[in-house]
Image (spheres, rainbow, N blue to C red):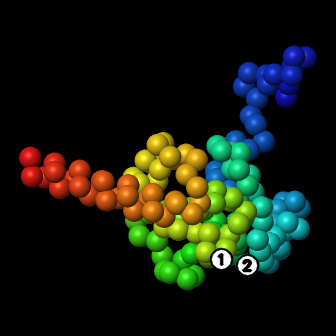
Amino acid sequence: MRDERGRFVKGYASWNKGKKGYMGANKTSFKKGHVPQNHKPVGTITLRTSHKLDEKYYWIKIAEPKTWKMLHVYIWEQANGIAPKGYCVIFKDKNTLNVKLENLMLVKRGSLAVLNNKFPDCHSELKETRVKLIELKQTINQRERSIA
């Protein structure tokens, strides 16, 4: 029972007093085996925009019910196996929609940080060489620190 302001009157027992937990299905609940209208089958490729960088990436559905993976990572893994921990797959030409295997390369995350910071406009033909030089410098620095 409610008063004129829409508040419950003191001492009024609510309709669910004493009931606990799950209240049961109603006519709008999903039925067993129901497939929603927006369901996508495995193998579906969609184009999504990254919220942080405002770049577009292709995604592929790899398993049910909702397992998605970036398409460029999926393509690289199909050809070379799962990327080791601490590595990521990047685009040589910085075009996130060019998901050809020839345009993908595996890079250590530390090397990628240096590449993005010091060489943001590195030409696509020189990117592999630049990454190798960065990794070589990092290895030299680690060895010098371990000796000292």
User: What amino acid does circle 2 point to?
Assistant: Val
Residues 4 and 131: in front is 131
- Say which residue label 2 marks: 42
Residue 66 seen: no
Residue reaching furthest top? 5
Which disc number belongs to residue 63? Answer: 1
- Mark 2, Cα crowd under 10 Å, few <14 / some 14-19 / many 20+, is some
User: Residue placed at 50% from the left, 81% from the top?
Assistant: 80
Residue 56 position in % (x across, y down): 73, 55
Residues 83 and 111: in front is 111
Q: Helix, strand or loop at disc 2?
A: loop
User: Residue placed at 87% from the left, 16% from the top?
Assistant: 5
User: Residue placed at 78% from the left, 42% from the top?
Assistant: 15
Left or right of residue 25: residue 121: left
Residues 62 and 91: in front is 91
From what the image shows, is residue 14 above or below residue 1? below
User: Residue placed at 68% from the left, 59% from the top?
Assistant: 96
In the rendered picture of this protein, how many numbered marks are placed on residues?
2
Q: Helix, strand or loop at disc 1?
A: strand
Residues 114 and 12: in front is 114
User: What amino acid does circle 1 point to?
Assistant: Ala
Quadrant assignment, res 131: bottom left
